[in-house]
Image (spheres, coloured by chain):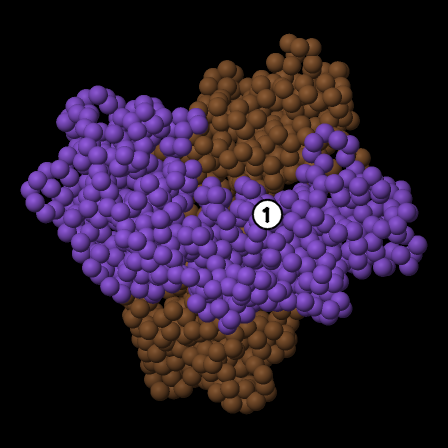
Chain colours: A purple, B brown
Amino acid sequence: MSETDTAELTELGRQLRVDAVRAADAAGSGHPTSSMSAADLAAVLLSRHLRYDFGHPDSPGNDRFVLSKGHASPLLYAMYLAAGAVDDDELLTFRKKGSRLEGHPTPRIPWVDVATGSLGQGLPIGVGMALAGKHLDRIPYRVWVLSGDSEMAEGSVWEAAEHAGFEGLDNLTLIVDVNRLGQRGPTRHQRDLEAYGRRLRAFGWHTVEIDGHDIEAIDSAYEEVRAVTGRPTAIIAGTRKGSGVADVEDREGMHGKPLPDAAAAIEELGGRRTARVDVHKPPEATVAAVSGLGRLSLPRWEKGEEVATRNAFGEAVTALGSARGDVVVLDGEVGDSTRAEFFSKEHPGRYFECYIAEQQLAAAAVGMQARGYLPFACSFASFLTRAHDFFRMAAISGADMNVVGSHVGVAIGQDGPSQMGVEDLAMFRSVHGSTVLYPSDANQTAKLVAAMAGAEGIRYLRTNRGESPVIYGPDEEFPIGGSKVLRSGADDVVTLIGAGQTLHECLGAADILAQEGITVRVVDLYSVKPVDAEALRTAADLTGCLVTVEDHHPEGGLGDAVAEAFSDGRPVPRLVRLAVTNMPGSASPEEQLNAAGIDAATVAAAVRLLVEEAVVG
Amino acid sequence: MSETDTAELTELGRQLRVDAVRAADAAGSGHPTSSMSAADLAAVLLSRHLRYDFGHPDSPGNDRFVLSKGHASPLLYAMYLAAGAVDDDELLTFRKKGSRLEGHPTPRIPWVDVATGSLGQGLPIGVGMALAGKHLDRIPYRVWVLSGDSEMAEGSVWEAAEHAGFEGLDNLTLIVDVNRLGQRGPTRHQRDLEAYGRRLRAFGWHTVEIDGHDIEAIDSAYEEVRAVTGRPTAIIAGTRKGSGVADVEDREGMHGKPLPDAAAAIEELGGRRTARVDVHKPPEATVAAVSGLGRLSLPRWEKGEEVATRNAFGEAVTALGSARGDVVVLDGEVGDSTRAEFFSKEHPGRYFECYIAEQQLAAAAVGMQARGYLPFACSFASFLTRAHDFFRMAAISGADMNVVGSHVGVAIGQDGPSQMGVEDLAMFRSVHGSTVLYPSDANQTAKLVAAMAGAEGIRYLRTNRGESPVIYGPDEEFPIGGSKVLRSGADDVVTLIGAGQTLHECLGAADILAQEGITVRVVDLYSVKPVDAEALRTAADLTGCLVTVEDHHPEGGLGDAVAEAFSDGRPVPRLVRLAVTNMPGSASPEEQLNAAGIDAATVAAAVRLLVEEAVVG
């Protein structure tokens, strides 16, 4: 690098600092000091190593840049200004209502692939993108992740380090801005770059440790990592938070606030500059052709067969994968249980084993959908709670992805409560814009797999471990937002509402009650969100009382979904919730359902009691 | 070790295998092969190195043994049989209804401190126990964690490795049973012991790599780790899954099922044995005296002061810590925001900085409560979703602990959605046996901090970032399960129900409406779980329509809590939910509340509409 280059890049680093300071100052909040520490790293990357066409963010050859330390958004937006992607007026809208330049970046900005701001997510998502680059797109773009040092404490970072190291993702570079100071004070390792380097090397990474304010060292490091093959790379850069302004540089208590005297700081940094960087465009590239038959041929079962819905999912997603080349399946080392392994046998090139690392599982799915693929991420429903924060953030990313949780409810039996998903409906329903589906038979499962593939946002499918009878024909349709009435008569005293295993219990209860001359309506509420409010209102009008039966805790699941349908001020029917309120131990599935009070006999008894007490009927 | 000792231990290892095989065979399910791989490790530990008084599990000097690979419960129960803690009849109740010998161990068993079965939790919880041993109990017991190799992929393990290494927890030993095979096939590193050793050493651990079926090597390793000072230790043991029975040994497809021919396997292992181990008792030990004034003097505020509830929490928990020496506070590197740092200044010896590692934060709290301390684990509400699985499992552990989430809702303003807790009520309400509290003013917060200290299970407190006026006097009482009526009159057309920030919005709406001649009842539903069903029924009787206003997604929060109170078949009032349904960007707190439709003006408008449309009034 020439002396002129070095001087220009030094200037650019100062410009990025100045613009970060200006943005935060205009906003009256934000994280300028966290931006300033990484300004030189960003300047050299933007000018000399990033391959990105700002005019065509969807260009397949583009490198991906993930700002894992999302609070350093002023730096990102200063980079956009330097690249000519935004103008100065827009920069100064930072953090204001309506501005796309939010406090933490989101894909409202066309050059942002995923939302960040929950630390420790950038690297695992970057792993998903790098996997896509290597195995799906087959384009040699590089995924650059700029991370803080504080977030290296997050376990998700080490799930990602392990995954990337094991897969030899040499198209992935982590830049760690070791500015020594977290939000409330020094990090564990302060400026001990080797502490980070040693850890990452132990996970199979190539590391380079540098002074993050030495322009030539930064440039050499980028050169070095671009040449490494066979392993992921990390640049561990010692920096100073607030670098360039003596009042704040390397000082505690300066996190997350505008500089006390922005004008003086800008002066100290040499004043405003308006250099424009002509960012290198990527070479022409084409995404590897995805093969797919185009026509979906779902598996079909005959009524009366005994099939676990997890098996139906496995077969259906395999069929979907045959029809659509963009379908990918990820699993957390339980593919033999979730039946994701059916897909792995048919489509091994699109199956991603994530081992027991559910955060990485979810993050890889987020990264792959950002590259245009349609992921199904699978694990036990109970263990998906590990990735709750990733689903939450995925919704902020506007991610389109499918999640499948198996082994739900007490119905799994002997394994006991640690393996029982009894909070998953609450978790996924509370995710913004989510779809939550809970099939009860094989044909319905297959149809819902096809339907969720065409839906938007985070789509969750809940599957059962145990077998249950096929009750629908293979040509029945199950639109998202719909429901099915399985029993109805003029004298129905209540409506029983179930889904999954409890639908079968409701049907069993209806049979028991019928023998006693009590008839009930039975609704299959397979679409838990969105819920079929109209059908519920009809049921309410006809029977006056709705009884929900769910293999889930009473909070946030089926009962809540039904109640929510009556939350608009209209008259509300009587409601009864039967759900899992006990703490299960080990027992057979039948014993578990009985102990929880959600088996057919107990549901029937509950209805009987309502009749006897003249609450209904 | 003498040859006789070696022979006896070899025999004991076989006995443990036989009993594990027998237990699973009797149950018809379970994980014998995962038990057999660790049988020799367990035999030597139990006979020669564990210090444990089975007659007095609460004896403070006892070592702690955490079976992180909880599915290997047959091994644990075989150890109990060998130690004379259970008899053979009980062993054979394994996984049967009513048995305390569940599929995965829980504290229903007196020698089990915490439930396991969600992999990757044993080590982080063990870190909490080891921290308690070193800094609180000040007793030199050792925490032994027996982990599988598959679970080393969990990020939580590396949060724990980092925490333990940084703290130099030489009273903590991790035993990794590297049996090469996970549930569905080989692990990433198969039998590459050095892969695990290298990683742990990079995190500051002392490691010993051994053949996990070599009795003398195992014994030497235990000797070695007991002598190490200044750093945590790990024994990385290469083993064979199903070891000792050729039909299953080191073979795929043998996970989680009884042996195909138990009788032949027992024969191959040399038949039943009934050796009893006289487990070494720990030396006498006394828990370090905890200092506390005994009398709680809560902070007090005057009505009308502007105070953030997070500040009130910080002051109140500090006062609680002065009164009670068993109170400990943990924070995830945001103590300046959650105000946990108030406690750290007053009680530095009982403050535990967990850095940005929320799973470890929760796990350390679980470990500390298992040692009898009263933890408050604090972070942003949004980031607590990272630890969802730990809260779920903590409930199965019957853990008594407090969790505090700050920065809730859109009311935080400019930082945007990644930092907004809008799913936390749903998450914590769905935890078994939880208590969920959401104060709106400083005095109420202080009283609720005191109340939650005396409650049971997982207690969650939701605090606000921004200031709000003190509306209650310092002597007002706020029992858990209660509520407050703040406005009421004979002609109230609806009841507005809020908590936290939205209570103030409801009061504002009431003021606006009053000027228009519309009066409303206002209820402060500070106890979200358990909810004050009686007060809600009274409100329903009086006003006919309940309107919930919450700074949270509509699923699983305040609206659901209110609806649930009417889920017993009684007549249900009209219900209206106002909640956050939009995806926020950056904006001021006031703009956010308005955009979400939960500010005073919009609440008033909603009521006005209900009146105009003659839905109410």
Residue A510 vs residue B591, the one in the foreground: B591
Q: How many marks?
A: 1
Position of B200 with respect to A235 (left or right) is right
The image quadrant of residue B317 is: top left
**Residue A189 in view:** no
Residue A528 vs residue A592, the one in the foreground: A528
**Residue B523 in view:** yes
Position of A17 with respect to A533 (left or right) is left
Residue under the point 15% across and 39% down: A9
Q: Residue furthest left?
A: A3
Residue under the point 74% across and 21% down: B613
Q: Where is residue A265 in the image (x, y as percent from the top left)?
A: 20, 25
Q: Position of residue B141 (x, y in %)?
A: 38, 60
Q: Pointer 1: what residue? A: A435
Residue under the point 10% across and 38% down: A7
Q: In this view, does A543 lie above or below A173?
A: above
Position of B379 with respect to A515 (left or right) is left
The image quadrant of residue B89 is: bottom right
Image quarter in which the C terminus of chain B is found:
top right
Residue under the point 32% across and 46% down: A65
Q: Position of residue A456 (x, y in %)?
A: 55, 47
The image quadrant of residue B579 is: top right
Crowd tier of the residue under label 1, counting other residues whose Cα lies within 10 Å: few below 14, some 14–19, many 20 or above: many
Q: What element carries label 1?
A: strand
Residue B423 vs residue B245, the one in the foreground: B423
Residue B162 vs residue A38, the one in the foreground: A38
Q: Type of residue at label 1?
A: Thr
Q: Where is residue A539 in the image (x, y as percent from the top left)?
A: 80, 43
Q: Chain letter for mark 1, please.
A: A
Image quarter in which the N terminus of chain B is found:
bottom left
